[in-house]
Amino acid sequence: MIEKEKYMITIAGNPNVGKTTLFNALTGSNQKVGNWSGVTVERKEGTAKIKDINLKVVDLPGIYGLNAYSQDEIIARNFLIENDPDLVVVIVDGTNLERNLYLVLELIELKKRVLVALNMIDELEENGISIDTKGLSREMGIDIVPISASKKIGIENLKSVIYDDLKAKKTIDIDYKYFKSPLKETIDEIEIILSGLPGSEKYPLKWLAAKIIEREDDILNQLLENYSSKDEILEKINTSIHNLEKKLNEESTVIIADSRYGYLHGIVKEFTKYHYTLNRRDLTDKLDAVFTNRWLGIPIFFVILLLTFQLTFFVGDIFVGLLEGFVNYLSNFITIGLSGKVSEVVLSFLTNGVIGGVGTVITFLPNIFMLFLIIAILESSGYMSRGAFVMDRIMHKMGLHGKSFIPMFMGFGCTVPAIMATRTLNSRKDRFITVLITPFMSCSARLPIYILFASVFFPGHQGLIIVSMYIIGIVVAILMGKLFKSTLFKEETAPLVMELPPYRLPSIKYIFKDAFDNSWHFLKRAGTIIFIGVIIIWCLAFLPAGVEYGSEMSVAGHIGKFIAPVFSPLGFGNWQSSVALLFGASAKEIVVGTLGTLFANGSMNEGLKSIFDPLSAFSFIVFTLLYVPCFGSLITIKKEIGLKWSLFTAFYTTAIAYIVSMIIYQIGSLIL
C-alpha cells in the first residue's frame, strides 16, 4: 500500500471572517485543542484527507496584518513568518474585501504560497455585488475560490484547488509595483543595507525593508543582536526613513499602509461590480442610524435587554411548570416506591439531596435555554456588536478602553472564556483591568438565583429585576475600572476600532444549536459540580444522626449560625442563606441547589418567604451578583495574570458585594 503524501496547511484571516467554520468543514471531528507553547492562547490543529494526500491543518488566531500587538496576533504573526507551511489558506470576508486582502498582500510579499477562500458569496449575491474572482486571481497571482463556509457552498471546490496547489508547488512572484517613488528608492536603499547581514537571507529583503520602514523592528533587532557595526547600520536605516518622511511629510508607517491600500482599492474597484438594488448594506446603514444613534443607541440597548428577559420568563415559564411538576412527581414516586425498602438515609439522599438540590436547578433549564436562544439571535443578526459599540461611549467617559466591553459582554455567558478573551486587548494594563472587572458581569450561572428570587418575591416584574442585576453589574464594573485606571493602572485610553458587520437573518439551525450546546453545558454542570456540591450540603444538613433534616441543629445549621451575624447588616442574617453563599463560592448555581436541599422537606417558595422579605431578597441577589467569582474563574485569572491578582479579585469583589448590598438594604429600610 502506497503511503499518502503529507502536507501542512494553515488557515489564516481577520477575526470573525469564518476561520473556525472553515476549519471545522475541512477537519470534521479530527481535531485537537491545546495551548501554544509558553502561553495560554488556544491552539487548534486537525487532520484531513484530500484524495491521496494527508493534511495537517493549523487554525491561527485572527490577525489583520503582519503588524501585531495583542498576544493572539503576535502568535499568528510569528507562526506565519517563522514557519513554512505548504500552503496558507487565507479566508477573507467578501463584503469587506479591501481590508481583508491586506493580509493576503503581505503574505505574498513574504513569498508564502497563498490560496484565498473568498467567503460569504451568498451575502454578496443578496447585496447585489459580484466579484470577478478570475480577474482578481490573475492580478494577484494566486488562486481565489468563492465559498460560503456557513452554508457549505464551494467547500468541495476549495478542497480540489488546495489539492492542485499543493501538487503544483508553484512559487509566488511579486513585482511590488505599488511601492512608488520615493518609497521605492527608500526600500531599495534599506534592502542594500540589509543584504550583508547574517540571517537576512531567511526573509525576502524587500518585505523586510518594508517592515522596518513600518517601524516593526523585532526582526531587525534579532539580526543586529550580535553584529559589531550595529549602531552604524541603525543610523543608515534611520536616515533613509527620516528622508522619506521629510519628502512626503508623513509618518513612514502611514506611507507603507497607504501604498498597499491604494493598490488594493484600485483592484477591488476594478474587479467588483455593484448592481443598483436595495441591498443589505443599505438596510444596515438605515438600521444603524437608529441602533447606533448617539442619543437612542444606549436606551435601545437596555430596552432590548429588558425585552430579552421578559420573553425569557414569558416563554420559559410555560415549560418550567411542567418540569417542576415532573420533579415533584419523581420525588413522590421515589418516596412512595422506596419507603420501607431502603434506609431513611438513602431515601433522604435521593429525595432531599439529589432531587431537592439538582432537580431544583434543572427546573430553570427552559428559562436558560430561552436566554441562550435570544442571545444567539442577537449575535448572529449583527446586533450584539452594536451593543458593544454604543457602550464604548460610556466606557470612554469612565476612562476605559471601549474594546474591553467585548470580553465583558461575553461574561454574560460565562466568566471563564470572557477572561480568556482579554488576550485580544493590545495594552497589558487594559487587559489586567478588564480581567479584574469582568467577574461583575452577570454570568448564566447566576441566572437560576435571579429567576428563583424574582419569581417568589417580585411576580410580574421578573424581567425588570433581572435587567437591574445586569445594569448593576455593568455600572459597578465601569466604576471599578475607572478607579483602577486612576490608581493601579494609569494609562491613556486608546479609541475603539471595530467593524460592525451587516445585519443578517439568523440561521435557525445555528441559533438552536448554540442554545442547545450552552444548555447542555449547563446540564453537565448540574450533573457534576452541582451534584457534588449538593451531596456535601445534604451530608451537612443530615448530620449528626437523629437531628431534624435541614434544621439549625444540623452541621449545616451550626456553620450557618456561625457565619450569619456577618450578613445581618445586609438583611439576610439567617443561617440558610449563609450556607448557600458559602458553598455558592465554588459555583453560583450551587446557591439554588443548597436552598433546594435545605428546604427539600417543604415548599421552596414558603421556605424562602420565611427568611426573606422583598428588600432582603433583592439585597441577597445583588450580593450573589457581585461577590467572589467561581473557582473556575479564579483559576483562569491565576493562569492569565497571576496568583496575587486572583486572590485580590476574590477579596475585593466580596468587599464590594458587601458594601453595595449593605447600602441597598440600609437605605431601603429607611425608605420602606
Image (spheres, rainbow, N blue to C red):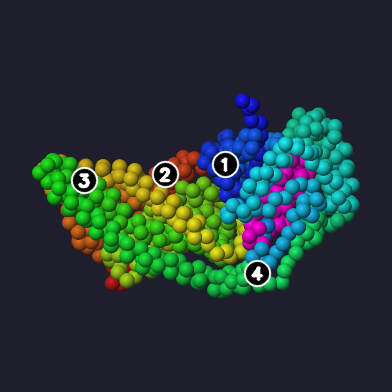
Q: Nearer the viewer, residue 606 or 318?
A: 318
**Which stretch is magenta?**
96-124
Q: Main secondary structure of the magenta part?
A: helix
Q: Nearer the viewer, mark 4 or mark 2?
A: 4
Q: Which label lies toward us, 3 or 1?
A: 1
Disc 2 to disc 3, how far (Cα)? Answer: 28 Å
Residue 201 vs residue 337: left or right? right
Q: Kindly indicate whether the residue at mark 3 contacts the one at mark 2 (C-beta within 8 angstroms).
A: no
| Left or right: where 647 falls relative to 287 | left
- The amino acid sitting under disc 1 is Thr
Mark 3 lies on a secondary structure that is helix
Nearer the N terminus, badge 2 or badge 3?
3
| Secondary structure state at the residue bearing disc 1 | helix
Q: Which amino acid type is marked by label 3?
A: Leu
Residue 121's spot in the image, x, y percent?
66, 58
Q: Amino acid at mark 2?
A: Gly
Label 4 environment density (alpha carbons within 10 Å; few <14, some 14–19, many ≥20): some
Of label 3 and label 4, which has the lower sequence position? 4
> What residue would you read off at disc 1?
27
Residue under label 4: 279
Residue type at the position of mark 4? Asn
The extreme front residue here reads: 1
